[in-house]
Image: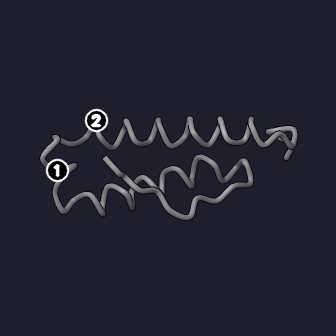
Amino acid sequence: YQRTGGDIDTASKLLQQQVNANLRAEFGRRVIKEVVSDDRDMIMSNLNKRTNQGVNPLGMSVIDVRIKR
């Protein structure tokens, strides 16, 4: 509440920034073949953990992150 002023839009933007930054970092470490293979579950798990670490100070918790396409 203190970091976002209780504004849901601000919280949403901060969460989106965390997810995007972590997604780019995960994809930057891998080749496309790894992303579309069975390593996808591991990538989503790592993404979920890193995003949670980033939004934990905001008082948020990420339950699940999925890579759709």
Contact (Cβ within 8 Å) of mark 1 with mark 2 = no
At 30% from the left and 61% from the top, the residue drawn is 42
At 66% from the left and 53% from the top, the residue drawn is 56
Q: Residues within 10 Å of mark 1 (few under 14, many from 20)?
A: few
At 55% from the left and 40% from the top, the residue drawn is 18
Sequence-wise, which precedes: disc 1 or disc 2? 2
Is residue 45 toward the left or the right of residue 4 in the image?
left
At 16% from the left and 50% from the top, the residue drawn is 34
Residue wearing tag 2: 28
Amino acid bearing label 1: Glu
Mark 2 falls on what kind of element?
helix
Quarter where residue 22 is shown: top left
Q: Against 50, is 41 above or below?
A: below
Amino acid bearing label 2: Gly
Mark 1 falls on what kind of element?
helix
Residues 69 and 43: in front is 69
Alpha carbon separation for disc pair 1 and 2: 11 Å
Dot label at residue 58: none
Percent from the top left, x then y, of residue 1?
85, 47
